[in-house]
Amino acid sequence: MAVLIATGVASWLAWRGVRTALRSEFEGRIVRVAATAAREIGASEVAEARLREEGSGYLSIQVQLVTLRTATGVENASLIDTARVTLVDARESEFGEGLVSPLDTLARAALAQALGGRPAVSPPFRHDGRVVQAGFAPVHDEAGRVLAAVAVEAGPLYAEVVGGLGRKLLVIALVTLLAIVLLAAFVIRGAWSAAQLERRLSRAENLAAMGRLTATLAHEIKNPLAIIRGSAQWLGKLEPEARRMADFVVEEADRLSRTVARYLQFARGGSDGATPAATGAGDAAAALAATLDLLDGELRARRVALERGPLPAAAPVALDNESLKQLYLNLILNALEAMPGGGSLAVALSERGGRIEVSLSDSGTGIPPEVLRRLGNPFYTTKATGSGLGLFLARRLAQSAGGDLRIVSQAGRGTTCVVRLARRKGRDLPA
């Protein structure tokens, strides 16, 4: 914009300077022509012209003005007395002679200045359908008194030159504008590409760091998990209630072990650098019920009321139950964190058009639009201790089974997550 403004200002100043110079030269020329003619006219000739007698004095002025008009190419030359009456007109005999000159109206100020004893030039005006300017020079007697004024009318030839220059400068300005726009487009595109590359490099660095961290964590977690699982199996030999709780511990230890393996595969770039493709048969309804039972104590502890819709007997999908639980856990735990002071969580499962839809709606704080647009990107999180991988993995799990995850939210009005999975043909569900 600065270059464009500078170019426009420079072009305008150049055009104005040329116009001023050409106009000044033109006006000086017509004044000099009028002054030359005025010096050749004497007091006796003016007196004879006032009497309207075609004597030698009148004819001498007429010949002089006609010759002036023919030799210089001006529009007209005339002699005007102090009463603003045209005494002699060079266009043809008797043309307006004896009448008040039209210049008394069209160029009054300049004519008055000339009759006051000083040469003058009028601004451009339109006369007989043409744009002209008039130059005036006073005619003096021997005593220095002003007897009349010679008027020379000429078309401002500089206007055509100035107009052509203006058009050329306009073309130059437009070409400059186009060049600047193209340059700006290239610069913006380059900056955008650089930003994209920087984001990709940052993501690659994050993935590499996550890979190293995950490999270390996987090694450190495996051994404690094995001990926890073995202890839980030993406790399962005790009383029935302890056996039921031990089964939970064994089941969750196995799930955690598989989750660690899944994160490790993610860190190593499995399945195009995302989660491994989910395969197998699962029951979306049974997995949801099991997840809600597992989180029952957590819901009560956080003072969150569960509004649980009816679940069908079976909802077969092409995603194993372990992956389904991980998906549900990520979404429900996010909902609980959005309701630190308690609230309600509505869970429903339905079937529409051959697809299983699981919706989870919380009454939490909601998500601002600018955050919602980036939600689900790896390593993007608004939590102080979050990794930014929970929603990312949940979405990839849904996509690996031919489904999707949609999130709808309004700040201050809660969030709804909808998991849509294709219903698997057949009803062969895992035991």
Image (cartoon, rainbow, N blue to C red):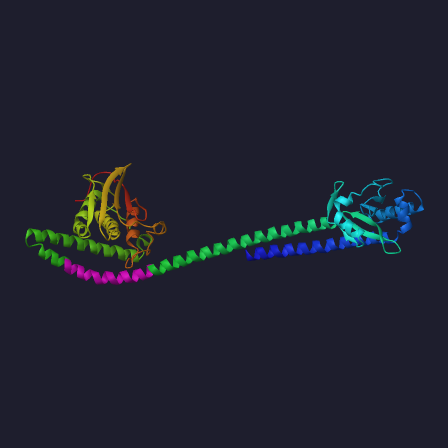
Q: Position of residue 164 (x, y in %)?
A: 69, 49
Which part of the image, by quadrant, shows the C terminus?
top left
Quarter of the rendering containing residue 406: top left
**Which one is nearer the viewer's eye here, 322 or 88?**
88
- Horizontal relation, residue 381 to residue 97: left or right: left
Q: Is residue 268 above or below residue 285?
A: below
Q: Position of residue 391 (x, y in %)?
A: 29, 51
Q: Is residue 54 above or below residue 302?
A: above
- Horizontal relation, residue 106 to residue 424: left or right: right
Q: How many marks?
A: 0
**Is residue 214 found inside the magenta-colored segment of the image?**
yes
Q: Position of residue 221 (x, y in %)?
A: 21, 61
**Which one is nearer the viewer's eye here, 48 or 164?**
48
Q: Residue at point 21% right, 47% down?
A: 321
- Horizontal relation, residue 369 to residue 10: left or right: left
Would residue 156 be visible to someone looking at this image? no
**Is residue 178 found inside the magenta-colored segment of the image?**
no
- Horizontal relation, residue 414 to residue 311: left or right: right
- The span picked out in magenta is 207-228
Would residue 27 be visible to someone looking at this image? yes
Q: Residue at point 5% right, 53% down?
A: 239
**Which one is nearer the viewer's eye here, 269 or 35?**
35
Q: Residue at point 85% right, 49% down?
A: 68
Q: Position of residue 95 (x, y in %)?
A: 84, 40
Q: Residue at point 9% right, 57% down?
A: 234
Which part of the image, by quadrant, shows the N terminus?
bottom right
> What secondary structure is the stretch in magenta mostly built from?
helix
| Residue at the right extreme of this rendering | 56
